[in-house]
Image: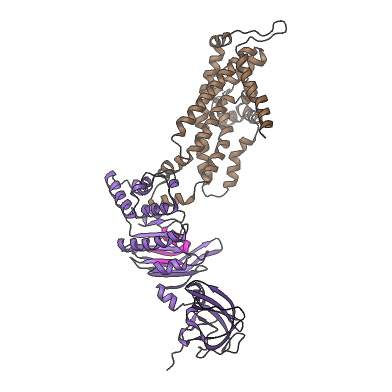
Amino acid sequence: MLLPALVLLVAFTHYPAVATIIDSFMSTPKPNRPSVFVGLDNYASMIEDPIFWQALRNNLWFALATIPLSVGLALAMALWVNGPMTGRGFLRMAYFTPTVLPMIAVANIWLFFYTPTYGLLEQIGGVFGLPSQNWLGDKSTALASITVVAVWKEAGFFMIFYLAALQGISPSLREAAAIEGAGRWFFFRRVLWPLLMPTTIFVLVNAVINAFRMVDHVVVMTRGGPDNATSLLLYHLYEVGFKYWDQGYAAAITVVLLGALATVALVQFFVLDKKAHY
Amino acid sequence: MSEIELRGVGKLWGDVVALSPTNLLIPGGSFTVLLGPSGCGKTTTLRLIAGLDSASAGQIFVGGRDVTNEPPSHRNLAMVFQNYALFPHLSVADNIVFGLQVRKASKQEQSERLARVLALLGLEKLRDRKPSQLSGGQQQRVALARALVAETKICLMDEPLSNLDAQLRQEMRQELRALQQKLGLTVVYVTHDQAEAMSMADLVVLLNRGRVEQVGSPREIYARPATVFAARFIGTPPMSVMALDGETIKGSKFAVAGKPSKATHVAIRPEHVSLDGDIPATITASEYLGADSLVRCQIGSEQVAVRITGQQVFEPGQNVQLAWSPHALHYFDNDGRRVEQQTPT
């Protein structure tokens, strides 16, 4: 019974993963020179590659900004649309819309927002007499601009998880707290937040993975530029692997990326899990 | 100082009347039961008193103070919920002191009150457990403890025993009643179980379709139901209500002597009917209950239940002669209101 699933998993997940690790110790095969074992050479060239370090740094900033922002925003939106109010069905849908859109489409929408001279931000800024700003073309704002897009895209998705969890909490808990005189903040801190902990862990793990996995909007909006200011690890990996065709080096970057992600996920599960009530 | 008064209190949900304007006085220190079938407005009434819902009309007084527009926490009362509403991530002790923490009671006061209420309800050994590690009865006690620790004089209870098994329910009834008397609490207790109401209450408020049918002690309501609804609701089994056709029971030739002129229905308790008389009836069913049996008989087109001792055996279709005392009869008019018998002069 397990065989079909097992075959697919091995063929498309386990074998490629193992193959990647092996490849990372081999040189890139060329038509006139087959792949040979090179030991840690690929990893050594990674350490010497300044663009790798820049991409890593960019990615850490990107993760540090998107994760708390998108999760915090998701929680705030979920708390808001969970309450009784008119038009909350519409609001929930509106918040969820960015999730439904493909990342390529999202990137194109935001490309228009950011466009110099006639983009939306420029036009709004012009009304208030703000100076013109090339958001994506300026090294100092490009990464932040990319980050905003990712937050916009992710928050609605995470909101759905929070909303589902909030709906699962019995309304009589809120009433019991109201009888005792607990204010909103006290109730949130002592009851809602602990009860939402499992959801928060799940969302955090996803947010971390997404922060290192999202590359579509970089491809569409900046191609890593200007001057590698928005190059994230995965984009750098794509460039090394498929533009410069250095497959061995690309495999080494992949291994590092996966290792880092696995570590973060495990730490989250084992550290935060202890604090969660299921 | 802990009486509750409703003056013209009503509640609408859109166009649906959940509670018609109602006047009600719940005396301080009493065990008052709001009784009625589901959808009768009893839980609505309780939630209005608690302040969890706001009244569409009227005023609510607690201890002589108008609390109609006060939030629940300013009404100086505690509440036990049907599903207990325990915080699943907090231990028994933390659940109980939750309200004290909200009110920023000192650590010392918290632990003193906690110890007192744990001892009162015999929960000392469970203080560090989580609600999911407790049985239904234990959860019920914790919910009760959380209500009692506030040391308010009023405790509202929304069907607190309905999730317990029959045996435990019996025990908890006695215990709740004893606690209420020991602490001098005003308890407002919602239930659909009339046996629970009869056994615990000082005062029963019988509700039906958002209206108060009758307010009285269990004995009063049992002995003198004010309406046909009360007659049909109270008692296991309740009174048999028979329609009258002029002077006779509908579909029969039996004339009811001494019938008040306005009466259109006559009712009698099963225990007030015996099988040694002259009222012709046919047995339709017989139910053996151990100590006694319940025999259902037909007079004309109307049904009457008879309670007899358990040994006697009857078969459906058998003809019997029923008897009752005219004083045991209750009369109701066309609107379902009680009509008093003319006392023979």
Is residue A111 at least partly visible in the picture?
A: yes
Report if residue B101 lies within the magenta region: no
Where residue A115 appears, as percent x and y from the top left, is 62, 26
x 50%, y 34%: residue = A201
Q: Is residue A72 above or below residue A143?
A: below
Where residue A190 appears, as percent x and y from the top left, is 41, 42
Corner quadrant of residue A14: top right
Q: Give the magenta part as a residue range.
A: B32-61
Tell me how the rendering is colored.
by chain
Which quarter of the image is occupied by the N terminus of chain B?
Answer: bottom left
Q: Colour of chain A?
A: brown
Is residue A226 at least partly visible in the picture?
A: no
**Residue B212 placement, left or right of B318:** left
x 44%, y 55%: residue = B81
Q: In this view of the protein, which residue sits in the foreground, B266 or A99?
A: B266
Corner quadrant of residue B187: bottom left
Q: Is residue B339 above or below residue B103?
A: below
Q: In this view of the protein, which residue sits in the foreground, B105 or A62?
A: B105
Q: Name the residue at the bottom extreme.
A: B345
x 45%, y 86%: residue = B327
**Residue B137 placement, left or right of A143:** left
Where residue B210 appears, as percent x and y from the top left, is 50, 67
Q: In this view of the protein, which residue sits in the foreground, A35 or A175?
A: A35
Q: Name the residue at the top extreme.
A: A32
Q: Is residue A275 above or below residue B209?
A: above
Which quarter of the image is occupied by the C terminus of chain B?
Answer: bottom left
Report if residue B35 lies within the magenta region: yes
Q: Which chain is purple?
A: B
